[in-house]
Amino acid sequence: MSSRQNKKIKSLWRRVGALLTMAAAAAAALGIINPALAVDPDPAGKVSTQLQPVYRIGCESSFMPFSWVEDGVCRGIDIEILAEIARRQGFRYELYPQNFTSLLPKLSSGLLDAAVGGVSITQKRAQILDFSDPYFRCGLALAARENSQIKSLNDLFGKTAVVKYGSLGSYFAETNMSRLDLKIIYVEDSPSMVKVVMQGKADFYTEDQPVMIYHMAQHLHPGLHMAIEELPPQVWGYALAVSRGSVPELVAMFNQGLAELKADGTYQRIVKKYFGDLLNPRWVDLPPAQSGSPAADRGE
């Protein structure tokens, strides 16, 4: 090979590298983190994978252990369940991590095809969203500073709550605001709730019970403790959510894949990996019929 040919090849590779760098920068600007492509559903090449849709799936960026971003990679229970279902069902997707407050609005406006990461089923949300079968049961718990005297609902009278916009915790605070004379501070994510309480600007925050139990067991928030383990009611289910009527095939594939994961024990292994001995059997004992139950209407 001549020196001129070598120079042309090196120049070509430099151009390819520049294009890849530009593509990566564009992906980062859009908020895409670790795009997850399932295995080729048609290895014989009968149908081009380029003709198959790549679903834009949003996830919460700070909801450990279900969905969070670490070192530029989305991790968590919901992320692993989604990846395994996609691999088995043969669909492709990209992850768009963000604050919970922007997750559902982007979904309902069509900027996202689906959302995971602690998205609870409620009847109000079901008016504009379609849900998959639920894969995790949750409820609310309440955390306060270690020197707090909060032990029951009656102790919340006149206190200040910090909650995430649009969350089930905000629904709890707003519903009880008049009865308990609550003041409410709104933030965009779970870490901000913790920070506000630690700074003494609020007396307590509410969080999904499994998440709070995990955080406390991992000593992620020193100086705080779980003051009330269960806030009534305790019936919600996490699910894949899509804009109503938009991608029914994705919901169907997710449901089929979830059933397979539960049948062969993969689902149980994923959940156990994160919770270990903390796992409460009630959290995973959630039949599909729960998603349509009137009891699911506990939030906005």
Image: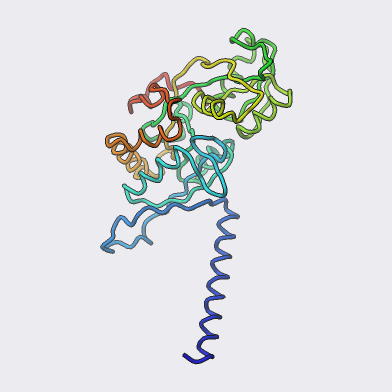
Residue 98: x percent and y percent? 57, 42
User: Could you tell me residue 288's position as x and y percent?
Assistant: 33, 28
Task: Give the quadrant of residue 263.
Answer: top left
User: Residue placed at 43% from the left, 30% from the top?
Assistant: 276
Residue sitting at 66 percent across and 32 percent down? 192
**Foreground pick, 163 / 216:** 216
Q: Residue at x 35, y 54 (%)?
A: 39
224 displayed left or right of 240: right
Could you tell whether 68 is left or right of 223 in the image? left
Counting from the top left corner in percent of width and height, residue 219 is at: 59, 28
Depicted 105 relative to depicted 233: above or below: below
Tell me, what colour scheme is on the image? rainbow
**Horizontal arrangement in the rendering, residue 210 relative to residue 88 (left or right):** right
Instruction: Relative to 63, say whether 175 is above or below.
Output: above
Residue 159 spot, x, y in % from top left: 69, 15
Q: Residue at x 67, y 22 (%)?
A: 184
